[in-house]
Amino acid sequence: MINFYLVTRSGEEFEVKGHVGCSLMEAIEHSGKGDLAAICGGCCSCGTCHVYIQSQFLPGLPAICDYERDLLECSPHQRQDSRLSCQVQLTEELSDMRVTIAPED
């Protein structure tokens, strides 16, 4: 298990625990915190699990695939630190990162 910090759309912050190997989206959903829609259930086909990853953790993440890039480019809230949480697998290196749920499109 690793710990990370989740900031909701309303600005509330929670410490969340997740299993190494599961997706960030799954960990957020299992926590019951926040307002992450994740409509497609992690299939990388809707963009409703859009989050902002604390910048110091971005270099350690896998590269963005074409599908994820396309979905993020459709969001008016896309930023340099944007990722789809269904595409980020939890690793020990991500312990203590801060994740902010992006505004709803």
Image (spheres, rainbow, N blue to C red):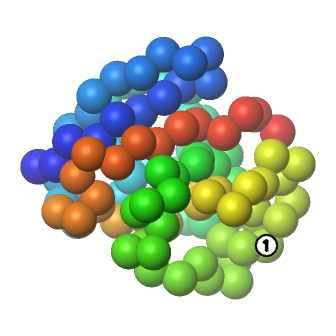
The residue that appears at 28% across and 28% down in the rendered structure is 15
Q: Quadrant of the C terminus?
A: top right
* Of 48 and 57, the residue lying toward us: 57
Question: In the rendered image, is residue 28 in sight?
Answer: yes
Q: Amino acid at mark 1?
A: Asp
- As drawn, is 21 to the left or to the right of 73? left
Q: Which residue is mark 1?
A: 70
- Up-down relation of residue 57 to residue 68 (above or below): above
Instruction: Please state the horizontal and vertical placement of residue 43, each as a whole percent of the image.
Output: 55, 64
- As drawn, is 45 to the left or to the right of 24? right
The residue that appears at 35% across and 35% down in the rendered structure is 5
Q: Residue furthest left?
A: 1
- As drawn, is 68 to the left or to the right of 91? right
The residue that appears at 28% across and 58% down in the rendered structure is 94
User: In which image quadrant can residue 17 be found?
Assistant: top left
The residue that appears at 17% across and 63% down in the rendered structure is 92
Instruction: Please state the horizontal and vertical placement of residue 78, each as a whole percent of the image.
Output: 77, 54
Question: In the rendered image, is residue 30 in sight?
Answer: no
* Of 47 and 97, the residue lying toward us: 97
Question: Element under label 1?
Answer: helix
* Of 75 and 38, the residue lying toward us: 75
- Up-down relation of residue 62 to residue 45 (above or below): below
User: In which image quadrant can residue 56 be found?
Assistant: bottom left
Instruction: Please state the horizontal and vertical placement of residue 10, each as a whole percent of the image.
Output: 61, 16
Report crowding for label 1: few under 14, some 14 to 19, many 20 or more residues within 10 A (C-alpha): few
Q: Residue furthest front?
A: 56
* Of 8 and 79, the residue lying toward us: 79
Total of numbered circles in the picture? Answer: 1
